Amino acid sequence: MDLSSKVKLLRGSYTLKEFADIMETSYQNISRYENGTKPLPEFFQTSRKKLGININWFFDDKAEMYETDQPKEIIDRYGKNFRRVSELAMADCGLPATQWEYNEKNFIIVDGLKHYRFVFAVKAAGDSMKPYIEKNDHIVCAEVPFENIKDYTAILLLYKSGPGTTEASVKLFYRNKKDDGVITIYSVNTKYHPEDVPLERVQKIYKVVKIIRDVA
C-alpha cells in the first residue's frame, strides 16, 4: 500500500476538512497527500500524537499500524534504550534543497533517544558541514522547543516554500542579539558565507541530536 492510500485509510469517513482539522493542517494538504504528494514530517508526527499511528507503518507494510511494544528479539539485540527512527528524506548541507527526496522504506536503529517525542532521520547531501557532517551521514533530528535549543548547535531548517515543496538545510546557528526575529546560520566549510534568516521565513526548526556515519 502506498503513502497516498494510507492517508486515505486514515481519513476514513471524515471529510477533507474534518480530517485536516484533526491533523492540524489544511484540507488542500490532505488532498495533495491523497493524490501522491509526500507528506511533510509534521503529518507523521501528528498521526503519531493524535491517532497513535506507528510512523514506520507509513514506510513498511509489514510494520504494525499502531504503536506497540517492541519485539523481544529487537530488545535482545539492541537493548531497551533504542528507537527505530524513520529516514524521511535527504537534506542538503549546502544551499537549501528545493524539495525533499523521500525514501519511503528505510529506518535506522538509534539508542539513547527515548526522552524525545518525535524523532526522524535525514541523509546528508552537500559538503558545507564537512568534516562535522559528511555526505550520506544520517542526521537524526528531534522536535525540541526552539527556546531550548542552544546557540552554536546544529539544526535542520524547513523553509516556507511553494505548494507541494519544502526547502530544507542543515546548519549551525546562533541568535541575533539585536533582533530576536532573526537567526544567523553558518557552515563548517568557510566557502559558504553566514546568512541572516528572518524566523518568519522558517516553517520549522528541528534540533540535530545525533550524527551516524557508516564506516565501510
Image (cartoon, rainbow, N blue to C red):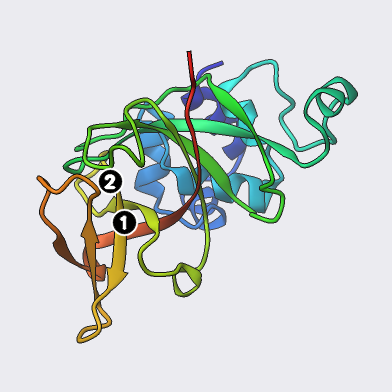
Could you tell whether 23 is left or right of 162 in the image?
Answer: right
**What residue do we see at 32% from left, 53% from top?**
157
Image x and y of residue 132, in percent? 36, 42
In this view, the residue in front, 79 or 12, is 79
Could you tell whether 198 is left or right of 53 in the image?
Answer: left
Residue 30 in the image: above or below residue 206: above
Q: Secondary structure at mark 2?
A: strand
Q: Which residue is mark 2?
A: 169
Q: Quadrant of residue 61?
A: top right
Image x and y of residue 71, in percent? 85, 25
Could you tell whether 211 is left or right of 64 in the image?
Answer: left
Q: Secondary structure at mark 1?
A: strand
In this view, the residue in front, 84 or 160, is 84
Q: Which is closer to the viewer, label 2 or label 1?
A: 1
- Quadrant the N terminus occupies: top right
- Specify the amino acid type for callout 1: Leu
In this view, the residue in front, 24 or 128, is 128
**What residue do we see at 20% from left, 87% from top?**
178
In the displayed orientation, state which residue is furthest to the top.
Answer: 216
Residue 34 in the image: above or below residue 1: below
Disc number at residue 172? 1
- Badge 1: how crowded within 10 Å, few (<14), some, or many (20+)? some
**What residue do we see at 38% from left, 54% from top?**
154
Whole-angstrom CA distance, mark 2 to mark 1, is 10 Å
Q: Quadrant of residue 167?
A: top left
- Specify the amino acid type for callout 2: Ser
In this view, the residue in front, 189 or 169, is 189
Is the residue under label 1 in contact with that under label 2 (CB below 8 Å)?
Answer: no
Image x and y of residue 209, in percent? 52, 50
